[in-house]
Image (cartoon, rainbow, N blue to C red):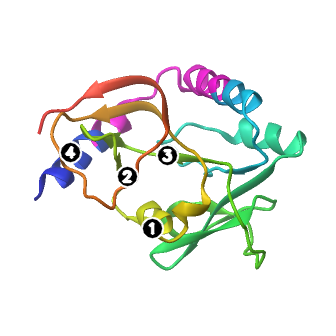
Amino acid sequence: MDKKAIFRNKAKKELSKIRVNNYKRDKLLIAQLINYINKSKIKDIMLFIPLKTEPNISPLIKLLREKGYNVYVPFIKGDTFKLVKYRLPLKIKKFGIKEPNNSYRYIKSIDLAIVPLLGIDKTNRRIGFGKGMYDRFYSKNGRYIKRTIFLQRDIYYTKELITNSYDISADYIFANSVKFIDI
C-alpha cells in the first residue's frame, strides 16, 4: 500500500469517529462561508451535496438559492462528474450520493467552488476519498473556476509529500481544526 492510501485509511478511520457537536461545528463553517461569500463578488457557486462524513452544508445551499445565487452541484458521469444546477428532487445515486436530475445546460464559469476533502499534505494539495473525480473534473474544467475553497470539519494533515502533481489545490481552506497524521 502506498503512503497516500495509508494516510487515507487512517484519516477515514479518524473521521468516522467524530460524532460530537457536528451540528454546531457545521454551523460555524457555514457562517465562515457566508461571511466570505458576502464580501466577494460571487454569482455562480459550485457546492457538494454532503455525505455523512462531510459538513452538512444543506442550509447554506438553501440560503444561497433563496438569495438568487446560481448553485451547481456534481452529477456523476463515469469516473468524473459534470455540474448541474441544484434543484429538487434529489435522487440517491452511485456511492450513496444524492444528485438532482441531469441537465444539458452549459456552465461557462464558476466564481467559487467549495470542495470537500479528507486531508492535505505539505503542498496543501487535496487528498480526497479515493475516486479521483475532483482531480479529473479540475483537469478538464479548472480554468473556468476562479476560486476554490476546501471544506471539512477536521482536516487531516501530513508533513510528507504524498500527493501527485494532478491533485488539486485551493485558494482557501476552511475547517474547525487540523489534525496531524504520521505515516
Q: Earlier in the sequence, mark 3 or mark 1?
A: 3
Query: Is 73 left, or right, of 4 in this rendering?
Result: right
Residue at 49% from the left image edge and 39% from the top image edge: 171
Report the number of discs: 4
* Amino acid tagged 4: Phe
Q: Which residues are magenta?
A: 13-32
Q: Of helix, strand and loop, which one carries label 1?
A: helix
Say if residue 31 shows up in the picture.
yes
Q: Are circles 4 and 3 on residues that touch, CB within 8 Å? A: no
- Real-space Cα separation, disc 4 to disc 2, in angstroms: 11 Å
Q: Amino acid at mark 3?
A: Pro
> What distance separates the C-alpha of mark 3 from that of mark 2?
8 Å
Residue 155 location, quadrant: top left
Q: Are marks 3 and 2 in contact (CB under 8 Å)?
A: yes
User: Can I make out residue 151 in this image?
Assistant: no
Of the image marks 4 and 2, the number of the one nearer the N terminus: 4
Q: Which mark is residue 7?
A: 4
Identify the amino acid type marked 1. Ser
- The disc label shown at residue 128, or none: 2
Viewer-proximal residue, 77 or 90? Answer: 77
User: How many neighbours does mark 4 have within 10 angstroms: few (below 14), some (14-19), or many (20 or more)?
Assistant: many
Magenta span dominant secondary structure: helix
Relative side of 21 to 168, left or right: right
From the viewer's perspective, is residue 106 above or below residue 164? below
Element marked by disc 4: helix
> Residue 138 magenta-drawn?
no
Residue type, mark 2 in image: Gly
- Disc 3 marks which residue? 116
CA–CA distance in space, label 4 to label 3: 17 Å
